[in-house]
Amino acid sequence: MRLRSKAPPASSFDRRPTSRRRLPNRACRKVRPFPAPERFACGFTLLELAVVIFIMGLMMLIAMPYFGGLKNAQLRSAARTMAGRATYLYEEASAQKLVIRMVFDLDHQSYRVLVLDPYAARPIFTADPAPGDTPVVLPPNVAIRDVTVEGIGTCRRGMIACQFYPDGYVDATLVHLVDSNGDVMTLGVNPLTGQVRIANGDLTQRQLYLR
């Protein structure tokens, strides 16, 4: 009787798994997020805002007068130029013994100078031959609103003239200049002294010299 030899037991290396092992699903793993960085509150405190607003208000308060000066700079410049020309003509008439006429052309917004020699054989007004005495045209934003001359009246269009005499007298004259913003400046010529006064506002001759 032949004996069957028993097969040696299978080694652990030869063992086959009876069932598949379930591998862990990495996609299903919960990934712990990194801790978020701390957020610091940004902005200004109420005190800092108050200081900034105070400084800005102080700067505006200091700059406002300069803004006002720039606003009507052309009007002031035109008024001073006209006043300087009138003062020069008063002195020139007395020194040269001439009758000098300052002609205002309201239609073309300009003024010019004519001279007359009262001792000439045929006295007649002619253009001033002095260099630089060309007609003065006002800036585009400035206009002669009206001119009032003693003995003639008020003119708002056309031409009107005041005269400077060799004996130190001048026709009392009042000129109103206005700019595109509606600001008005008043010029007045004193008939006895030839002094020219300039003031802000729409003034009469009396109001101008009572200031």
Image (cartoon, rainbow, N blue to C red):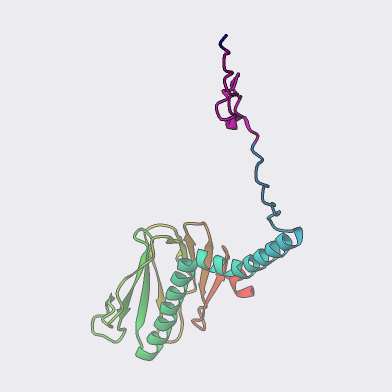
Whole-percent x and y of residue 104?
Answer: 38, 67
Of the pair 58 and 101, the residue shown nearer to us: 58
Whole-percent x and y of residue 166?
Answer: 40, 86
Farthest front residue? 1
| Horizontal arrangement in the rendering, residue 62 relative to residue 183 (left or right) | right
Quarter of the figure that contains the C terminus: bottom right
Q: Is residue 161 above or below residue 33?
A: below
Quarter-wise, where is residue 4 in the image? top right
Farthest top residue? 1
Quarter-wise, where is residue 49 in the image? bottom right
Q: Is residue 82 above or below residue 10?
A: below
Dominant SS of magenta comes to loop
| Horizontal arrangement in the rendering, residue 205 relative to residue 51 (left or right) | left
What are the residue bounds of the magenta stretch? 3-30
Farthest bottom residue? 95
For the point 60% across and 19% down, which residue is it?
18
| Horizontal arrangement in the rendering, residue 36 relative to residue 121 (left or right) | right
Whole-percent x and y of residue 5?
Answer: 57, 17
Quarter of the figure that contains the N terminus: top right
Whole-percent x and y of residue 107?
Answer: 36, 58
